[in-house]
Image: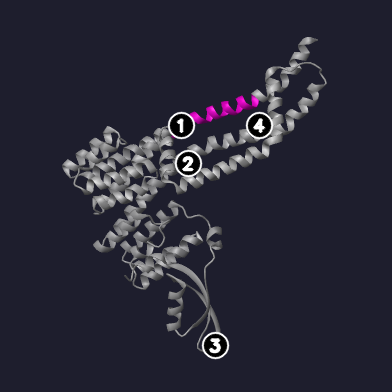
């Protein structure tokens, strides 16, 4: 029971009076304010005020990235393998971390370890930074005396996952930026440019081409309703995000749609399968039971469809079914993956087969993203040129028509 409160520790700022009636203050991690008051009272401090530490400093701190966690993990593993105690290794690494929020977290882990709490129990307090896979491997490493080796495996795993994520984000960044620029250009032309041409055309006293009239009508509508248009987009975005975070049905539906989007869907599917294989190989190779490993794999897939599938696979495996059979029933894994898993189960080389599967699909994702990047650039240029060109032609058609009349 002693370890349960530590899983929900929060940082509190307190003010009180010591034995000499002097005002003192400080910060302390505790499961609740009453626990903190009792602890300080035993130290001879009469607490006058306790409040939860404001999250402003955390919000203002730079976001913690997977690369930063991977680098810190690898440094800790290197120091531990050199014979330096865990607490000293964590302290040394925390002093060299540039991100103040991550440095503060590792410093708290160091204090916990010095206080007799295991590293695995300490990092459980930060589930957004250290996922279940990270915690499980640290726990196995502490029990088996191979913490440095397993931390190296965690670091390598995080680096591979971040590399795939970075590739996909980089491929998505360019089209999003081009489309954003296109929206801004169209908005400027509809609000400022087309009205000036409309004034010019009104002096012609003649009918306008259909394309030109359509652009002018669109300009009228946009100038009158632009605020409703953009407010609607913003509200729609936040509503979509709200329901996605709070509804498992919405997550499942949206993630399934994404998997079937042309071009992008196959890449994301390969990336999910690569994460599945890499995570399961890492957990299984560390000696984590397959059923427990599948629980961590479900959270690592990053897709609700595969998350639900992993939970079904986990239930089937816990009843004694082979992993390959359970995976096949989900109809989400290619035959090649099923064949590799089946071979691994039969030969006792499941970790090796999963590693090879992950390597294959990671390479597939890299090649697909590179091909997509080279393909998207000309496509986006054509789209942007087509949009702007249509607006320009629409505005100059009446002028060409007037010139032809003379």
Q: Residue furthest right?
A: 203
Which of the marked residues, 3 or 4, is nearer the chain's N terminus? 3
- Please say if 331 is above or below 53: above
Q: Is residue 384 magenta?
A: yes
Which of the marked residues, 1 or 4, is nearer the chain's N terminus? 4
Residue in view at x 43 percent, y 36 percent = 258
On the image, numbered disc 4 is attached to which residue?
186
Few, some or many C-alpha atoms within 10 Å of disc 4 (few <14, some 14-19, many ≥20)? some
Which of the marked residues, 1 or 3, is nearer the chain's N terminus? 3
List x then y, in percent, for residue 152. 33, 55
- Kindly tell me whether residue 189 is visible in this rendering: no
Tag nearer the camera, 3 or 2: 3
Query: Residue 72 appears in which quarter of the rendering?
Result: bottom left
On the image, numbered disc 1 is attached to which residue?
372
Where does the C terminus fall, quadrant-wise? top right
- Please say if 377 is above or below 54: above
List x then y, in percent, for residue 194. 73, 28
Which of the marked residues, 3 or 2, is nearer the chain's N terminus? 3
184 vs 291, nearest the viewer:
291
Helix, strand or loop under label 4:
helix
The answer to whether marks 3 and 4 mark residues whose Cβ atoms lie closer than 8 Å is no
Instruction: Give the CA separation, mark 1 to mark 2.
Output: 12 Å
320 vs 194, nearest the viewer:
320
List x then y, in percent, for residue 339. 23, 35
Residue in view at x 27 percent, y 47 percent = 314
**Prevailing SS of the magenta stretch:** helix
On the image, numbered disc 2 is attached to which residue?
169
């Amino acid at each position: 029971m002693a370890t349960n409160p530590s899983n929900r520790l929060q940082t509190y700022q307190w003010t009180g009076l010591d034995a000499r009636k002097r005002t003192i203050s400080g910060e302390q991690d505790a499961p609740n304010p009453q626990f903190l008051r009792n602890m300080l009272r035993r130290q001879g401090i009469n607490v006058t005020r306790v409040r939860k530490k404001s999250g402003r400093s955390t919000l203002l701190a730079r976001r913690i990235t997977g690369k930063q966690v991977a680098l810190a993990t690898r440094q800790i593993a290197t120091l531990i393998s050199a014979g330096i105690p865990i607490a000293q290794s964590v302290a040394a690494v925390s002093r060299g971390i540039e991100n103040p929020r991550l440095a503060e977290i590792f410093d708290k882990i160091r204090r916990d370890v010095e206080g007799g709490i295991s590293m695995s129990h300490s990092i459980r307090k930060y589930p957004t930074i250290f996922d279940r896979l990270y915690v499980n491997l640290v726990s196995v490493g502490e029990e088996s005396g191979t913490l440095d080796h397993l931390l190296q495996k965690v670091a390598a795993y995080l680096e591979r996952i971040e590399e795939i994520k970075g590739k996909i984000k980089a491929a998505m960044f360019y089209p999003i930026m081009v489309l954003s620029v296109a929206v801004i250009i169209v908005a400027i032309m509809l609000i400022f440019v087309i009205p000036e041409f409309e004034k010019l055309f009104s002096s012609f006293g003649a009918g306008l081409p259909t394309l030109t009239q359509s652009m002018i009508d669109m300009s009228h509508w946009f100038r009158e309703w632009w605020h409703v248009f953009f407010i609607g987009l913003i509200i729609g975005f936040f509503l979509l995000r709200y329901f996605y975070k709070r509804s498992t049905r919405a997550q499942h539906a949206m993630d399934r749609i994404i998997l079937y989007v042309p071009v992008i869907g196959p890449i994301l599917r390969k990336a999910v399968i690569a994460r599945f294989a890499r995570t399961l190989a890492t957990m299984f190779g560390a000696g984590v039971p397959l059923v427990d490993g599948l629980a961590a794999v479900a959270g690592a897939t990053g897709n609700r469809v595969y998350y639900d599938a992993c939970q079904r696979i986990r239930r089937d495996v816990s009843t004694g079914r082979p992993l390959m059979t359970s995976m096949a029933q989900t109809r989400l894994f290619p035959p090649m993956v099923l064949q590799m898993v089946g071979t691994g189960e039969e030969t006792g080389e499941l970790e090796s087969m999963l590693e090879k599967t992950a390597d294959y699909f990671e390479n597939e994702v890299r090649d697909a993203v590179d091909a997509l990047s080279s393909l998207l650039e000309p496509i986006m240029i054509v789209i942007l040129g087509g949009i702007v060109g249509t607006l320009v032609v629409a505005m100059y058609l009446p002028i060409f028509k007037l010139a032809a009349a003379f």
